[in-house]
Structures are given as C-alpha cells and as structure tokens.
Image (cartoon, rainbow, N blue to C red):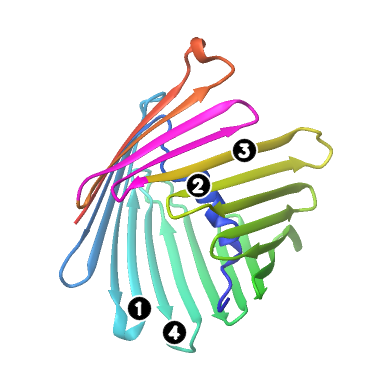
Amino acid sequence: MAVPPTYVDLGKSARDIFTKGYGFGLIKLDLKTKSENGLEFTSTGSANTETSKVAGSLETKYKWAEHGLTFTEKWNTDNTLGTEITLEDQLAKGLKLTFDSSFSPNTGKKSGKIKTGYKCDHINLGCDVHYDINGTAIHGAAVVGFEGWLAGYQMTFEAGRNRITQSNFAVGYKTDEFQLHTNVNDGTEFGGSIYQKVNDKLETAVNLAWTAGNSNTRFGIAAKYQIDDEASFSAKVNNSSLVGLGYTQTLKPGIKLTLSALLDGKNINGGGHKLGLGLEFQA
C-alpha cells in the first residue's frame, strides 16, 4: 500500500455497494459534457415522487493541469452560489490546498473553507478551517497504513465553544479483494463493514451498526452482479426487511439508464413502496 485513503473514504468500497445504483423515490437526470479546452459541465435535475419537489444543480470545472490548478463554480436551485479553487502538488509533492466559498443571495448567508491535505507513503493527513455565521470550526483527520492495515482519527474543534465536538476512530484492513472497516464515533456510535470481491462479476458487502445504551443492532447485506459489460444488477436487504433492487443498463456509449425499487418486506401488499428512475448522459 503506497498512500492510504482519506478518513472519509475508509470503508468506501462497502458503502458503494449499498448506495450506488439506487435512487428510491426520485426521477433523476444527469448531464455531463467536456469541451475541447478541458472545460467540464455537469448539470443534475431530480424530482421527488412523494413531495413533487424539484431540485437541480449546475457545475463548471476547468483544470489548468500544467499549474496544478482547478477552478470550480457551482449553483443550485436553492440559489446558493459556490466557488472553489484547488492547487495540488505545486508547493510540495502530495500537498493539496483548496479555497471554497459559498453565498446565498436570498438570505445573505456566507461561508468559507480553507482545506489542506497532504499524502505520502503510509500517511494521509487533512485539516480544514470552516467559517460561517455560527463561528469557526477546525476539522482534522489522519490515516496511517502499513501492510494493508489502516488506522484513522477524525476530530472537530469549535473555536466559539472552545472544545472538541467530534472525535472518531477507525481501524481496518484492505487488500484488492477484501476490506474490513470498523469505527467508533464520539464513543457512542459503533459500526463495521466487510467488502468482498468474490470474482470479476460479483461483489458483496455487509454492514452493521449500534448505539451505546440501545440494544437494537442495525444490519444489512448487499451485492452487485455485473451481468455483462453494459448491465449490472444490485440488491440489498436490512434487518427492517427493507429490500432494495437496482438495475443499470448502458443503452449506448454515453447514455446510462438506472431503475430501482425499495420494497417493504413486512408489508408487501400494503403499498408504500418506492420506485426510482435515472438517466445519465455523458459526452
């Protein structure tokens, strides 16, 4: 293992099996294009089938590769504007600096972030300073890795309250075909996941979580099967008997269709199930 993942990416392979390929209760449309000069456009629109609420976003990104710079502009239907400038591998190899700001013209709310990250063999560090109307918060994280073993710590310090408000630990083991992840959040939330790549077509994952002082354990199992180069099928179930099904099909190069359904296994005939439809265009 050369460089370990960031703290938020620990256990990501298992989470992806549970989350990707599903869009319950949503009709979603994604459009991604890239111009010849490297300017990328991403637009997303979705409609909630229960509330009929429509949401959308637009993002433009330009990478100035020779100088390690990335410029990103964002807008969403909540009328929030965002600007992000990233500088990577210029001041030092493995060092990444990001300046992120957002502004809402309707409310006048402003926020800003300065993000720093450094990675090298066996170490991945991150420190973000976030400023908004509620005050200043410092988020720090560190992950170390050795021969497949991973250990990480994440914390949040709120300057206005002068105390640490978040303290999380994680330990795991990672190979190309197997990943184990465990975590403790604030000493009260416990979780774990296992990811297994059975073969080139089948991936499986298991997760569980519980809260101190509560005897209820949350448990789920999921799998993704790659039918062929253009189609895949996903399924998951949890201890509440909620069954999720997803099917993804590449209709033609650059066009992808996703169908999904969430079924209540305890009340199959009672209705209340959720369906989802997604279309992704990329050019």
Q: Which of pointers 3 and 1 lies earlier in the amino acid sequence?
A: 1
Q: Is 147 left or right of 214, judged from the image as shown?
A: left
Q: Are marks 3 and 4 in contact (CB under 8 Å)?
A: no
Q: Is residue 233 magenta?
A: yes
Q: Is residue 85 magenta?
A: no
**Range of magenta residues:** 227-252
Residue annotated with mark 2: 17
Q: Of all residues shown, which one is farthest toward the front?
A: 199
Checking the image for residue 139, the label placed there is none
Residue that carries the numbered disc 4 in the rendered image:
89
User: Which secondary structure class fits the magenta region best?
Assistant: strand
* Residue in the image at 65% along x and 68% along y: 140
Estimate the spatial distance between the alpha carbons at disc 1 and disc 2, rounded to whole Å.
32 Å
Residue, disc 1: 69
Q: Which residue is the site of mark 3?
A: 220
Q: N-terminal of the two: label 1 or label 4?
A: 1
Tell me which label, 4 or 2, sits earlier in the chain: 2
| Quarter-of-image position of residue 158 | bottom right
Using a 10 Å C-alpha cutoff, classify the residue at mark 1 as few (fewer than 14 neighbours), some (14 to 19) or many (20 or more).
Answer: some
In terms of secondary structure, where does tag 1 sit? strand
Q: Residues within 10 Å of mark 4 (few under 14, many from 20)?
A: some
Q: Is residue 238 above or below residue 202?
A: above
Give the quarter of the figure containing the N terminus: bottom right
Above-or-below relation of 1 to 40: below
* Viewer-side residue, 169 vs 199: 199
Q: CA gap, disc 3 to disc 1?
A: 41 Å
Q: Is residue 265 visible?
A: yes
